[in-house]
Amino acid sequence: MKILKDILTYAYRGSGKYILILCVALSLVAELVSIAPLIGTIASILVSAYFCAIYFQLIQSSATGGKEAPDFPDITNFFEDVIWPMLQIFAVGIVSFGPVMEYLLWAGEDGVSSLIASGLLGFGVVYFPMAMLAVVVLGYTGALSPHIVIPAIFRAGWLYWFAVFMLCLLYFAESAIESALSEFFIIEFIVSILVGVYILMTNARILGVLYRERQEELGWL
């Protein structure tokens, strides 16, 4: 229960609340400028990249024992500090969910087996968190390789499965909230941004705490 409370309140402790406010403000700005197609697209990419940089820093801080969210990321090299984390997350997503996407494209609308599709999706859901944690902690994209990720999943034990369950629960809750508020456009718009940023920060805390609690078993460093 102590770990659960720590995870769920992380976004509001220390600098977390300021990161939460800034990310919500940036999201609102990006949405407002989206009426201009080119500028809006560029703004969305830059905001997403900055969120990825924050996500990496939150995981790193939590993994090394940080009790509260750190200050905003230092940006000395824009590509390495902002763009590169976004590309790494994209790579982890492709490796994790590429099999199910490839299967759906290969099978076509009429040939899809729900059992196979669900199995491949489940693989992605289980694989992604540990692959993401490995990339952040070990510091290189190749850490998403199965020979690192799959043994780590088993070594992390029940705590990893609890982390996956928590992540799934968070995203189901986000979807439910958005559906419940779908008729109230402005409220749904603001709440969905707030919930999305909260989940981003909580997601990072879950992965960081997982590593903090299982670093000896994982034996990465």
Image: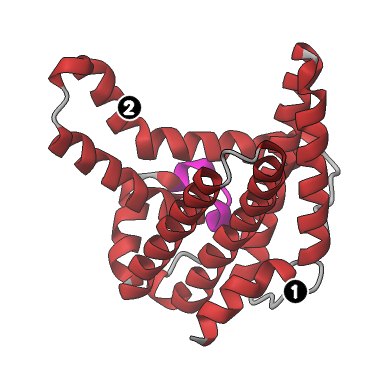
First of labels 1, 2 by sequence position = 1
Residue at position x 51%, y 78% from top?
Answer: 4
- Between 28 and 138, which is closer to the camera in this rendering? 28
156 shown above or below 140: below
Residue occupying the point 66% across, 71% down: 10
**Which residue is outermost to the bottom?**
2
> Is 139 within the magenta?
yes
Q: Which residues are magenta?
A: 136-143
Q: Which residue is mark 1?
A: 13
Residue at which label 2 appears: 101
Query: Which disc number belongs to residue 204?
Result: none
Q: Secondary structure at mark 2?
A: helix
Q: In front: 112, or 211?
A: 112
Q: Amino acid at mark 2?
A: Met
Q: In this rendering, would 122 be left or right of 40?
A: left
Q: Nearer the viewer, residue 120 or 169?
A: 169
Residue 13 placed where, x, y %? 75, 74
Dot 2 alpha-carbon crowd within 10 angstroms: few under 14, some 14 to 19, many 20 or more = some
Disc 1 and disc 2: Cα gap in Å?
A: 38 Å
Magenta-span inclusion, residue 150? no
Overall secondary structure of the magenta section: helix
Nearest the viewer among 151 and 188 is: 188
Q: Using the image, determine if residue 216 lies above or below residue 97.
A: below
Residue at image location 81% in from the left, 67% down from the top: 15
The reply to whether residue 84 is in sight is yes
Q: Amino acid at mark 1?
A: Arg
Quarter residue 19 falls in: bottom right
Q: Name which residue lies at 64% across and 77% down.
A: 65
